[in-house]
Amino acid sequence: MAHTQVVIIGAGPSGLLLARLLAMAGVRTVVLERHSRAYVEARIRAGVLEPGTVALLNEAGAGARLQAEGLPHSGFQLAFEEQTHRIDLLALTGQQVTVYGQTEVQKDLGALHLAAGGIIHYEVEAITLRDLAGRQAGVEYLHNGVRERLDCDFVAGCDGAHGVSHQAIPAQAVQRFERVYPVGWLGVLANVPPVSHELVYANHHRGFALCSMRSQTRSRYYIQCAVGDRVDQWSDEQFWNELQCRLPAAMASALITGPSIEKSIAPLRSQVTEPMRYGRLFLVGDAAHIVPPTGAKGLNLAVSDVRFLWEALTGFYQHHDERLLNEYSSRALLRVWQATRFSWWFTALMHRFTDDPAEHRLQVAELLNLAHSRAASQAVAENYIGATF
Ligand code: APR
Ligand code: PHB
């Protein structure tokens, strides 16, 4: 029977970063991914990296292109009622974030791990997990039409919200906390220069808008849409008109529009699974938790989980010490709940959820409080930068 030390399910950022760090520590892994390499490398996701995320990517040896091409952002803008308030991350926390697309992180990690001889099986089907609570865990799967079995010491469930890992846990062994928000985000990627050199989060009575970017020549814009909207209901022209409408006039008139190269709708929801471990299975990243995208925390939380699990597994293999494995879930969940709270607060501050006019007035009052209170702005900045991990 084939055996490896850690089977990693999913070759998203969590799976690849964990595989890379474990390989550097001499721990053997096999990564099993449902989709093709081309598919996973083309998925458009968020692009704001906390300092802790950049640090771990550097430790993994995946920092070269990130250092060269990532855009350091020392602040971001909150727009509301024809005004803007800048959250000066650098002045308020001494740190900044880096704008670098998750697609690029994904490509960098994949290339690095494969070049170092790492094993990633793409287009694997019908994965089942065996004996997670027993002495000998394992996986079975179909690869190139052949049924394979692999025994392992541990399974890292890095297969996102729709993967098999979290479903393999008996319902009574975990608690799931879920919240569904009554809106979605319609996102457009376009080869146009960004309207502002910093991200702009806009509160408007018609709904939220976000101006983000991937480079000096590629912009990523979002508008809040109805939960049931379909992409084909939104022409490029309708999208640009609605975005302009939700930005302060001076910014709207400076907006450069162009044909979309990607357009998609994402629902807003949050979910946390507790604990993030079941026997020999450890849940990592989106497989364990989903946050609404408003604070750009999804990828950063996935990376902090990876750090905690990497430390725990190297402690086990190098020093026969199980302490950090036993503490993995509680260490990770501390940060998960912090980020869940911030994402929920920021989402509630910026979106239109109801027709109640008091909702918007309360939001504007809170935004004005942020604009006038250094203490309130500092709390936002600290959360945006993320707790140290
Ligand atoms: N078998 C194998 N692989 C699977 C399976 C399965 N049954 N189900 C899903 N996968 C793969 C997906 O195809 C994907 O490549 O697992 C990977 C999970 O990757 P992500 O969804 O990117 O999750 P994660 O690596 O935890 O990264 C979290 O991604 O979704 C964003 O906002 C999120 O930025 C955050 C980050
Ligand atoms: C993005 O660039 O896609 C992005 C940026 C910030 C967010 C969410 C998404 O809060």
Image: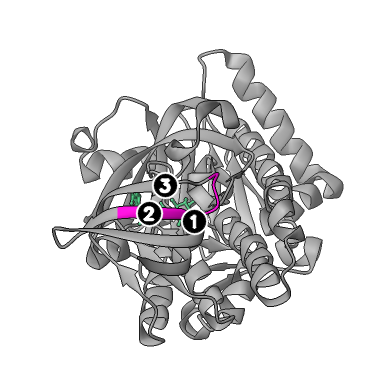
Question: What amino acid type is highlighted by mark number 2?
Answer: Val
Q: Quadrant of residue 172?
A: top right
Q: Is 46 drawn above or below residue 246 in the view shown?
A: below
The magenta segment is 133-140
Instruction: Give whichever of 377, 34 is nearer the camera.
Output: 34
Question: What amino acid type is highlighted by mark number 1?
Answer: Val
Q: Is mark 3 within 8 Å of ligand 1?
A: no
- The residue indicated by pointer 2 is 139
Q: Label 2, secondary structure: give it.
A: strand
x and y percent of residue 98 in the render? 57, 69
- The residue indicated by pointer 3 is 130
Residue 168 makes an appearance in the image: yes
Q: Label 3, secondary structure: give it.
A: strand
Determine contact: label 2, label 3, CB under 8 Å: yes
Q: Is 109 drawn above or below residue 252 in the view shown?
A: below
Say few, some or many: other residues with alpha carbon within 10 Å of mark 2 (under 14 / 14 to 19 / 20 or more).
Answer: some
Quick one: label 2 or label 3, which is nearer the N terminus? 3
Say few, some or many: other residues with alpha carbon within 10 Å of mark 1 (under 14 / 14 to 19 / 20 or more).
Answer: many
The magenta stretch spans residue 136:
yes
Q: How many marks?
A: 3
- The residue indicated by pointer 1 is 155
Determine contact: label 1, label 2, CB under 8 Å: yes
Q: Which mark is residue 353?
A: none
Q: Nearer the viewer, mark 1 or mark 3?
A: 3
Q: Quadrant of residue 108?
A: bottom left
Quick one: label 1 or label 3, which is nearer the N terminus? 3
Say few, some or many: other residues with alpha carbon within 10 Å of mark 3 (under 14 / 14 to 19 / 20 or more).
Answer: some
Question: What amino acid type is highlighted by mark number 3?
Answer: Arg
Quick one: label 1 or label 2, which is nearer the N terminus? 2
x and y percent of residue 299 in the render? 52, 56
